[in-house]
Image (cartoon, rainbow, N blue to C red):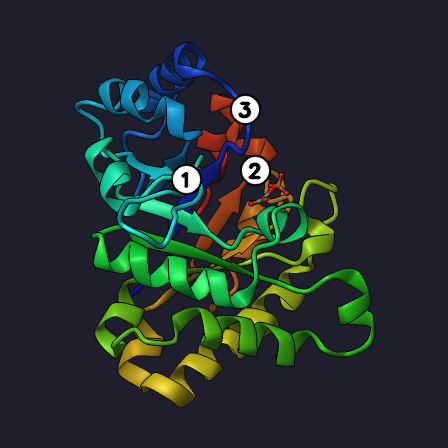
Amino acid sequence: MRVPVIAGNWKMNKGPKEAAALINELKPLVKDAEATVVVCVPAVDLHAAKQALRGSKIKLGAQNVHYKESGAYTGELSAGMLREAGAEYVIIGHSERRQYFGETDETVNLRVKAAVQGGLIPIICVGEKREQREAGYTDTLVTYQTLIALTGLTGDEVSKTIIAYEPVWAIGTGLTATDEQANETIAVIREAIRAKYGKRVSNKVRIQYGGSMNPKNVKGLMAQPEIDGGLIGVASLKAADFSQVVNNSK
Ligand code: PGA
């Protein structure tokens, strides 16, 4: 009943010309997709990507958003600016932002609220590091990361957000959580949302898996009942790979 959502996270790859070329290659390959397909491109590519996406159902996303509408925040971009440039989705709290740019659960929450108020659909990333999994903290950690990120939203708003469960040890490493590990942890996240916002909300919210998802492992992951799609890094940079992930995500 939940429509899967497959989102490409291009990270710091490709300028406007290459972005348009990749989108033009991708469009015919995913034209029959049943999933919601999103490409989260570098902000400087939004304009070119928007133009290249004309006539396609593929949605456009950004990779971060600031929590103020405007002001003296050098280098930052507001939800309004991203909307105007064509974005409908935005990744928030990616582990690379937490690791390299000091993002915290509190700033993630501020950004989530700003995104929702500004009309963007947030793709909120949560996930444990290897040592946290080994210490047995995964469930507690993802529960709190999720609930803090969503603080201040109404149930209705929560039901429209997308959560990406991304174990940090699986990102860009070629290591994937097993199908069962990913399903179990996503079930924990959904249960946390149910306990706080009720079943109507938890049944609607889409929770993706992310971390080395690719054409080979997508079917097994997507066969799990709790997994509603994927946030795809490396495999989103090649049209052939990304389209295979999309087309095998039913
Ligand atoms: P990966 O990245 O697919 O390259 O592991 C996923 C992500 O960081 O969202």
The CB of the residue at mark 1 lies under 8 Å from ligand 1? no
Callouts 1 and 3 close, C-beta under 8 Å: no
Q: Quadrant of the N terminus?
A: bottom left
Instruction: Say whether marks 2 and 3 touch (CB < 8 Å).
Output: no
Mark identifier at residue 233 = 2
Which dot, 1 or 3, sits closer to the camera? Answer: 1
Q: Secondary structure at mark 3?
A: loop
Secondary element type, mark 1: loop
Q: Is residue 176 above or below residue 55?
A: below
* Residue 250 shown left or right of residue 201 in the figure: right
Quadrant hosting ligand 1: top right
Mark 1 or 3, nearer chain start: 3
Q: Nearer the viewer, mark 2 or mark 3?
A: 3
Read off the residue under disc 1: 76
Dot 1 or dot 2, earlier in sequence:
1
Residue shown at the point (19%, 35%) measured from the top left: 84
Q: Quadrant of residue 132?
A: bottom right
Q: Quadrant of residue 194?
A: bottom left
- Of mark 2 and mark 3, the one earlier in the sequence is 3
Residue 13 circle label:
3
Residue occupying image coordinates x 47% and y 22%:
239
